[in-house]
Structure formats: C-alpha cells, structure tokens
Amino acid sequence: MEMTDDDLSSPGRRLAWARTQAGFKSKAAAAKAVKMNEVSYRALENDQHGFTKHAAQLAQAFNVPVLWLLEGGHNQSPADKWAQKAQLLPQGIESVGDENVVTLRSFDLSYAMGPGTNIDDYVEEGTYKFDPDMLSRLTRAPHEKLFVARGDGDSMFPTLMNDDTVVIDTTQRVVNLRDRIWACSIHGAGAIKRLRPAADGKVEIISDNPAVKDDLVDATDIHIVGRVIWLGRRV
C-alpha cells in the first residue's frame, strides 16, 4: 500500500497503515489479535485517544517500531526502510562455484537501539551464506525473514555458548509454544532466552545456566524479534 505523508501524519493513521500491512483487513480482527475491545481499538485509529500505554503491544502485533508508530519518521515507512536495506544485499538463492547459497543478514543483538521491536533496531554486522536446502528443512519462512546473530554471554549455557551462531526466524513472534528459545528485548535490552507463557499476562524468562536466576515479567515488557531455529558453533 502506497501512502502519502499526510496519510501517515498522525498516530492513528500510522496504526491503520501498520494494521493493513500486517494483513488485518478489518479493525475487528486486529482488535481481537491484540486482545482489545473493538470500540476502544477503533478510537485509536480515529485518533480519539492516545495509545502510549498500548504502543509496545500494537507495534509487536503489526511488526513496526514503537517510536515510528508514536512519533512518525522522515517521510519513510518501516516497509520502505526494509526494502531499501534489502536492495543492498543479494536476496534469494545465488550460485557460488558449483553450489547454491542463500545470503542472510547478520545482526548484533547485544545492544538494542530503541525498544527493539523490529530487527532494524539492531546493529547490522554483515552476512552469512547458507545452504538453501538446509534452511528449507528448518522453516517455510522466506529467506529475507531470516537473520543470523551471535550468542553473547553464558546465561544459556550449555544450550548456547558464547559466540555461537544462531539463525532466527522473524515470522515467528508469538510465544505460543512452551520452552522455545527466542531473540527478544527485555525492558529494552537485547537477549536470547528461553520463554514460557505464564498466568496473568506474564512470561517466564528461563536461563538454561543454573547459576543464572529465572525471571517473571509482564508480557508487555518483552518484545519478540523472532524464534531461534538453528545454532552452530566452532569445535
């Protein structure tokens, strides 16, 4: 959907744009997805009420940065930003010698820029090349929705060791399966953790290292970037 500056000039209009880009054709469907009363949600898109309190939840559901949703940007939507970056790197399958490879972007998850709700909030480090058949066995997600990161620290030892390489699927952003490992930001800090849904809108943050204490936080304090679907390490 192509939008003008005026179309994105208010939080409500940006919210409506983000909703449609995320695939929600109706406000009712979006309200249900974010567990909000439909009348209350419609008021947000109509700019009748501010939604600072719900911004993180809405940004996560519609896959846009929180700051952009609240404050806008310099004539550039999140989709435009993603498309421009994608043009700088080879996408899809390419031939290298006698082999086919897929080029995935690599990001440093150690430091999140802003709330960390979108992969573009992190520092880009380079690229990795992978076998396309291997990736197709791991996920059905398109290659441009996958990225590579490095483990940092020992809180997930022995499952993950410092400097391990992981592949993260950004199409998986809902913690609806127990004990999977996720790339996320917790209170704005980047992390790779095992997450478990808990009662009363809480999420249990589990560190596989028994020396590191587990934590329990509000789901609104965690912003999911994607699920870890593969890891590799030097021997």
Image (spheres, helix red, strand yellow):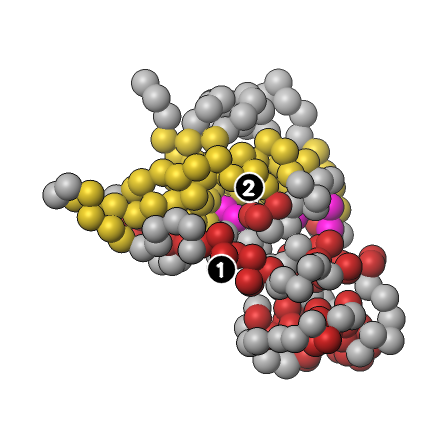
Identify residue type, mark 1. Answer: Ala
Magenta stretch?
220-227
Q: Residue at x 69, y 59 (%)?
A: 74
**Would residue 49 be visible to someone looking at this image?**
yes
Q: Is residue 223 magenta?
A: yes
Which type of secondary structure does the marked residue at label 2 adopt? strand
Q: Residue at x 52, y 48 (%)?
A: 226
Q: Which mark is residue 183?
A: 2
Q: Nearer the viewer, residue 46 or 84?
A: 84
Q: Main secondary structure of the magenta part?
A: strand
Q: Residue at x 39, y 49 (%)?
A: 89
Q: Nearer the viewer, residue 74 or 95?
A: 74
Q: Nearer the viewer, residue 169 or 114?
A: 114
Identify residue type, mark 2. Answer: Ala
Q: Residues within 10 Å of mark 2 (few under 14, many from 20)?
A: many
Q: Are marks 1 and 2 in contact (CB under 8 Å)?
A: no
Residue 36: image x %, image y %? 75, 69
Q: Which mark is residue 5?
A: none
Q: Which residue is mark 1?
A: 83
Residue 27: image x %, image y %? 68, 79
- Most extreme residue toward the right is 49
Frontmost of labels 1 and 2 is: 1
Which type of secondary structure does the marked residue at label 1 adopt? helix
- Please identify the quadrant where the C terminus is shown: top left
